[in-house]
Image: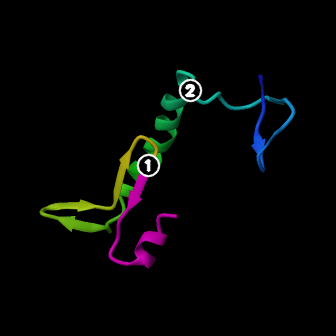
């Protein structure tokens, strides 16, 4: 549990307690993020869609917390969402 403030419409809020989650920047934050999204990325890669580059089928690109979904059309991409 930790106390925090937020900026809302240019005004700093009063302190409030956050009882769940991790502070951004804590050592466990990126580890838990990667563990959670690893399953999502693997399941997306199992879907036979996306674009073909050489012999490789590509439907998701990921780096850090950025993701790009690829497909032949919007309908194909929406199936991932």
- The residue sitting at 76% across, 38% down in the picture is 6
Badge 1 density bin: few <14, some 14–19, many ≥20, Cα 10 Å = few
- The residue sitting at 53% across, 21% down in the picture is 27
Q: Residue beneath label 1, please? A: 66
- The residue sitting at 65% across, 28% down in the picture is 22
Query: CA separation, marks 1 and 2?
Result: 17 Å
The N terminus lies in quadrant: top right
Residue 8, compared with residue 46, is above or below; it is above
- Numbered-mark total: 2
Specify the segment rendered in magenta: 66-81
Q: Residue beneath label 2, please? A: 25
Q: Is residue 81 left or right of residue 52?
A: right
Query: Tag 1, which secondary structure?
Result: strand
Q: Is residue 62 left or right of residue 32?
A: left
Q: Nearer the viewer, residue 18 or 31?
A: 18
Residue 51, compared with residue 61, is above or below; it is below
Query: Tag 2, which secondary structure?
Result: loop
Badge 2 density bin: few <14, some 14–19, many ≥20, Cα 10 Å = few
């Amino acid at each position: 549990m930790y106390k925090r403030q937020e900026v809302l419409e240019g005004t700093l809020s009063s302190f409030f307690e956050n009882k769940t989650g991790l502070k951004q920047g804590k050592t466990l934050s990126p580890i838990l993020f990667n563990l959670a999204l690893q399953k999502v990325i693997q399941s997306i890669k199992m879907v036979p869609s996306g674009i073909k580059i050489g012999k490789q089928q590509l439907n998701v690109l990921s780096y850090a917390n950025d993701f790009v979904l690829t497909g032949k059309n919007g309908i194909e991409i929406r199936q991932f969402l």
